[in-house]
C-alpha cells in the first residue's frame, strides 16, 4: 500500500519528531514519495519490507535484504553470510513506496548495452561498503556498462507535471561518461527528444553544460542536454564537488526547476540554481515520460560510473523547507566510510609474490613478459630476471588509497592495470583513468586460500589467470575468461614474500 504520513509521524507544534524518515517528511510536506530506493536503509519510519535482492554466483540462488528493524538500516550480515566464498550481484532494488516501482537490470535501448543480449550489467553486492551510524551496509557501485531501469513505473510525473527527487551519491566516484543518472526518463529506452527526461546527473561531462571549476558537478539531465542552470552552457553558481557523501536534489514544474546539494555527512543544503527552464527549445513545457533509471542515460548510454546509496522521487514540487528537513535526516543517518579490503593484510611498501591456487597450477606466480601480465613457474632456481618479473611492490591505491596498486620490481614506475579487461604492465600517465585501472582491493580468497583481488572500478571483476594470461574476470560473464568453471580457484592468490 502507499504509506500515509499520518501513520508514521508525530507532530509537536511545527517540528517533526526525530523518527521521521525522508518519505515521511515529503508526505508531511504534501509531496509524497512515489518511488523510494535504497540498499542502505528504510526511507519510511514504518518500513520493514524488502530493500534489495542479491544473487550469488555459486548456485544462482537469490535472497532478500531487509532492514535490521522497522525503519532501520539494511541487515548486511544476511548478505555477508549468503555471499560468503562466492560472488554476489544486486538483481533488484525494491521500491519502498508501495507502488511497485522496483529497479531491475536495464534492457537494451538506443545505445545498446554491454552484454551480448544488450542488457546492462548488474552491480556487485559488495563493491560499495559504508556504515550508517556505525553499522555496515552496502551501496550500489555503478561501473561503466552497469544500469537499472523501470519503464513501467506508477505515479511518476509525465508531461509538464511537477516532481522532486533526491539521491545520496559518492562524491568521489565519477567520470566524464554519459550518464550517471537517477530519475525520470523515456519509457522505451530511446532518445525521444528534448525535455523527455528529468534526472539527477553527477560527473564531469562537458558536452552540454558545466558548472564552476573542473567538476564534478550536479546537473539535470533533461535529455539532449546536461543543464546546470538556465544558461545551457554554464552556471558559475554550480560548484565543483569534493564531498565523500553528496546529497543531490532536483525538482521541476511548469517553467521552473531547481538543483540543490550538500555534504550528506554534515551541514545544510545550498541552492545551485532556482529559476526558469533552460532557454533552449523543447524544455518549456517539458515532455517527461515517467520511466525510472539508475546509472544510465535515457537511451541506455552506459559509459558513466558512480555510486548510489539512496534516493526518492515525489509527486509535486517539494518546498525548500521539506528538503531541508530531509537533509537533516540524511546527516542524522551518519554515513561514513569503512574498509574496502579484507583477508590477509597487505602492507604498503612491502615486496610480495602472488601464487596461483588452482590445482595443477600452484607452482605458477603472477608475473609479466614485457607488458603482458601472465603466470609463470617460478622457484628458487629460476633466473634472476624471472624472479624480478614475478615480484611486486605494494603501493597505496593510485585511484583510491583505501585499496592498493602493484608496482613492478624490475620496471620501476610501471604498474599492473587493466585495459579491455586484460591485465597489462604500464607506466603511469598520471590520468584519473590510469590510476583507477591500476587500483585493486583484496578480500578473503573465494576458495578459502589467500586473497581474491577485485578491480576497484569494476568490483564484479577479479584478477584471474586463464590460459596462463591474467584478466579481470567476472563470475560467469560473456567472455571466455569469465567462465564460471574454476572461477574461485583461478581468482584466489596466496601472497608471499617476493623473489627479488
Image (tube, rainbow, N blue to C red):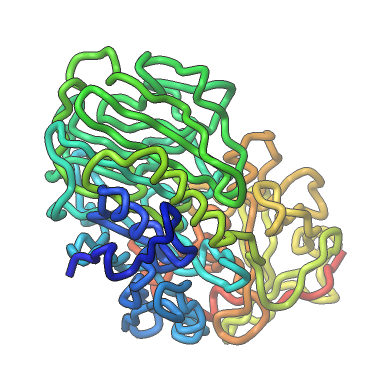
Query: Is 255 situated above or below 154?
Result: above
Q: Which residue appears at 23% of the width and 52% of the height? A: 118
Q: Give the quadrant of the N terminus.
A: bottom left
Residue furthest toward the front? 13
Q: Nearer the viewer, residue 45 or 145?
A: 45
Query: Is 120 situated above or below 219?
Result: below
Residue 60 lies in quadrant:
bottom left
Q: What percent of the width, then of the height, locates residue 260?
A: 45, 35
Q: Is 214 situated left or right of 279 in this image?
A: right
Q: Which residue appears at 40% of the width and 83% of the height? A: 58
Give the number of marks.
Answer: 0
Query: Is 460 situated above or below 80?
Result: above
Residue 119 showing in the rendered view: no
Q: Nearer the viewer, residue 271 or 305?
A: 271
Q: Is 201 situated left or right of 431 in this image?
A: left
Q: Which residue appears at 24% of the width and 66% of the height? A: 3
Residue 55 lies in quadrant:
bottom left
Query: Is 335 situated above or below 414?
Result: below
Residue 175 showing in the rendered view: yes
Q: What percent of the width, then of the height, locates residue 327?
A: 49, 49
Residue 310 lies in quadrant:
bottom left
Q: Give the quadrant of the C terminus.
A: bottom right
Q: What percent of the width, then of the height, locates residue 383?
A: 83, 65
Q: What percent of the width, then of the height, locates residue 323?
A: 41, 44
Q: Which residue appears at 82% of the width and 60% of the height? A: 348
Amino acid at each position: 500500500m502507499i504509506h500515509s504520513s499520518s501513520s508514521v509521524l508525530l507532530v509537536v507544534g511545527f517540528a517533526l519528531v526525530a523518527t521521521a524518515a525522508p518519505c515521511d517528511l515529503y508526505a508531511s510536506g504534501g509531496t509524497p514519495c512515489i518511488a523510494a530506493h535504497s540498499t542502505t536503509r528504510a526511507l519510511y519510519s514504518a518500513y520493514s519490507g524488502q530493500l534489495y535482492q542479491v544473487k550469488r554466483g555459486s548456485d544462482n540462488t537469490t535472497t532478500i535484504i531487509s532492514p535490521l528493524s522497522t525503519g532501520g538500516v539494511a541487515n548486511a550480515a544476511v548478505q555477508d553470510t549468503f555471499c560468503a566464498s562466492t560472488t554476489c550481484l544486486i538483481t533488484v532494488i525494491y521500491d519502498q513506496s508501495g507502488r511497485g516501482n522496483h529497479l531491475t537490470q536495464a534492457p537494451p535501448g538506443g545505445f545498446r548495452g554491454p552484454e551480448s543480449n544488450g542488457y546492462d550489467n548488474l552491480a556487485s553486492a559488495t563493491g560499495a561498503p559504508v556504515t550508517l551510524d556505525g553499522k555496515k551496509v552496502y551501496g550500489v557501485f555503478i561501473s561503466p556498462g552497469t544500469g537499472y531501469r523501470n519503464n513501467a513505473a506508477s505515479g511518476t510525473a509525465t508531461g509538464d507535471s511537477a516532481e522532486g527527487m533526491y539521491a545520496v551519491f559518492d562524491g568521489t566516484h565519477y567520470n566524464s561518461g554519459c550518464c550517471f543518472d537517477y530519475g525520470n526518463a523515456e519509457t522505451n529506452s530511446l532518445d525521444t527528444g528534448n525535455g523527455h527526461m528529468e534526472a539527477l546527473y553527477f560527473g564531469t561531462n562537458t558536452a552540454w553544460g558545466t558548472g564552476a571549476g573542473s567538476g564534478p558537478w550536479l546537473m539535470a539531465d533533461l535529455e539532449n542536454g546536461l543543464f546546470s542552470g538556465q544558461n545551457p552552457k554554464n552556471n558559475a553558481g554550480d560548484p565543483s564537488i569534493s564531498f565523500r557523501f553528496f546529497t543531490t536534489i532536483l525538482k521541476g514544474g511548469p517553467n521552473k526547476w531547481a538543483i540543490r546539494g550538500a555534504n550528506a555527512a554534515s551541514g545544510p543544503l545550498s541552492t545551485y540554481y532556482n529559476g526558469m527552464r533552460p532557454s533552449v527549445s523543447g524544455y518549456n513545457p517539458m515532455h517527461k515520460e515517467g520511466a525510472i533509471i539508475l546509472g544510465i542515460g535515457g537511451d541506455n548510454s552506459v559509459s558513466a560510473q558512480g555510486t548510489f546509496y539512496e534516493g526518492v522521487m515525489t509527486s509535486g514540487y517539494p518546498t525548500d523547507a521539506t528538503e531541508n528537513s530531509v537533509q537533516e535526516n540524511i546527516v542524522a543517518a551518519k554515513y561514513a566510510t569503512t574498509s574496502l579490503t579484507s583477508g590477509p593484510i597487505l602492507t604498503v611498501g612491502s615486496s610480495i609474490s602472488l601464487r596461483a591456487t588452482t590445482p595443477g597450477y600452484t607452482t605458477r606466480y603472477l608475473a609479466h613478459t614485457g607488458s603482458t601480465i601472465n603466470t609463470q613457474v617460478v622457484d628458487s632456481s629460476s633466473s634472476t630476471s624471472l624472479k624480478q618479473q614475478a615480484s611486486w611492490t605494494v603501493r597505496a591505491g593510485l585511484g583510491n588509497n583505501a585499496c592498493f596498486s602493484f608496482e613492478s620490481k624490475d620496471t620501476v614506475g610501471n604498474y599492473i592495470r587493466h585495459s579491455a579487461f586484460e591485465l597489462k604492465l604500464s607506466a603511469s600517465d598520471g590520468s584519473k583513468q590510469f590510476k583507477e585501472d591500476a587500483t585493486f582491493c583484496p578480500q578473503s580468497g573465494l576458495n578459502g586460500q589467500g586473497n581474491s583481488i577485485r578491480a576497484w572500478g569494476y568490483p564484479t571483476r577479479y584478477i584471474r589467470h586463464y590460459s596462463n594470461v591474467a584478466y579481470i574476470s567476472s563470475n560467469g560473464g560473456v567472455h571466455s575468461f569469465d567462465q564460471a568453471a574454476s572461477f574461485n580457484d583461478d581468482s584466489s592468490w596466496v601472497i608471499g614474500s617476493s623473489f627479488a
